[in-house]
Image: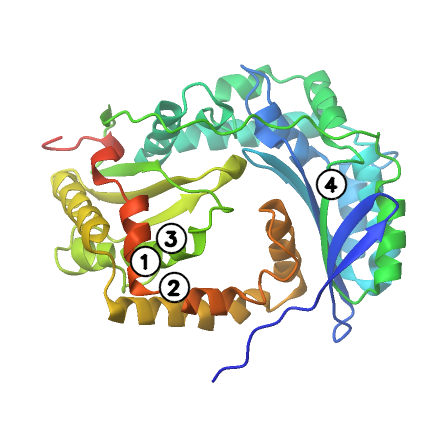
Amino acid sequence: MSTPFRLPIQRVAANGLTAWLVEDHSVPVLSLVWGWDGGAALDPAGREGSTGLAASLLTEGAGDMPAIAFTDALRDGGIGLGFSADSDGFDGGFRCLMDALPEAERLTRLAMTAPRLDTAAVERLRARAIASARQSLETPRGQAGRRFWAAAFPNHSVGRPSAGTAESLAAITIDDMRALLGTQLRRDGLTIAAAGAIRPDELAALLDRLFAGLPAGAPAAPPALPGFTHFGQQVIGLDSPQSQAVFGHEGIGPRDPDFEAAQIVLRILGGGGFSSRLTEAVRVRRGLTYGIGVGLNTAFGGGVLTGSVASDNTKIAEALAVTREEWARMAADGPTEAEMVEAVAYMTGSLPLQFTDSRRIANTLLGMQQNKRPLDWLDGRSDRLRAVSRDDAARVARRLLKPEALSVTVAGRPVGL
């Protein structure tokens, strides 16, 4: 019998703040990550991309240090510091050797409390973001993804392009970004995780100092995810030798009691590698694509089941037809016992590989908290996966997979659609 996986997580309290810590002194490194609710959900209409652009500017100079001086200080200390925004959150984090911790603390605090947002840095990063936004629209993948989410959630921020468009990015002012940072970077509403060579009392003192300069209060809570709007099939004409399809429907959220059984079902239906049913049916047997996959998007605490596949314009209709057939077959019959054994063995066997360095450990701890997991959730995960029977998985497959509800967006010049 294999040894149960255990991750020694400690809860650390620090003057109103709480962090999860995995303490490990085998290497003198610390990874610290934190996050708030908000992100692109806070972007004003017509200013999509504001929060993401502002996040990228936090390491482009702060206090009396312009961009080059700030970057040089990070490099000289061997410090990896970064901030990012996604559809429903805003994250920050750094990784450094313990000898460089005082400097990492100083630069991080400066970035959050005194960002410069110099015009030269703003325009340089704005140009890069605009180029990226335009490039994404040149590809079938970018077009299909954007239109899929816009149709599925027409009245929610997740239906807007979180990275912005060329037009919205061009309209963002420095005052817009300062206002957003003022509402986003707060001392309350923080979720914090750490891994590495630091004791609980040292971490508590560090957190108290690091976030002390932020204003009190928490960012506004992003709006809850509404129900998925079924829109059938839409085709976007785009000159390309291949068509890209994005498909999906309502799913389940991370706190649903069937979530782990659903992960097994989706691993078998469209998970990684060549063992999934969709890869076998669409790629291996018919040669219709190089890759196809499905998964659950759990932004805003909700659940949206999505997948994607690219194929030659003359073959995309067949690829989608086969996908629907496999979707319906799994919904009707569930997985086989052999598929269950293989999927559970992979998921339990690969679990320890997610924790091979302090950065991955800290990010996992942060995600657990954001998904409202208990402190010992990982300890029992392998046992919970092994306890899912084939009948359990079949029931969840019937509940989760709705072939008649699949909505599909195709970008390209598809034949037969």
Mark yes or no: residue 271 visible: no
Residue corresponding to mark 3: 262
Distance, label 2 to label 1, CA atoms, is 7 Å
Give the residue drawn at x 16%, y 50%.
288
Q: Earlier in the sequence, mark 2 or mark 1?
A: 2
Residue corresponding to mark 2: 388
Query: Which label sits in the foreground, 4 or 2?
Result: 2
**Label 2 SS:** loop
Percent x, y of residue 339:
27, 67
Is 26 drawn above or below residue 328 in the view shown? below
Residue corresponding to mark 1: 393
Percent x, y of residue 116:
79, 29
Q: Quadrant of residue 240?
A: top left
Q: From the image, which quarter does the C terminus lie in?
A: top left
**C-beta proximity under 8 Å, tags 2 and 1:** yes
Give the residue drawn at x 42%, y 69%.
386
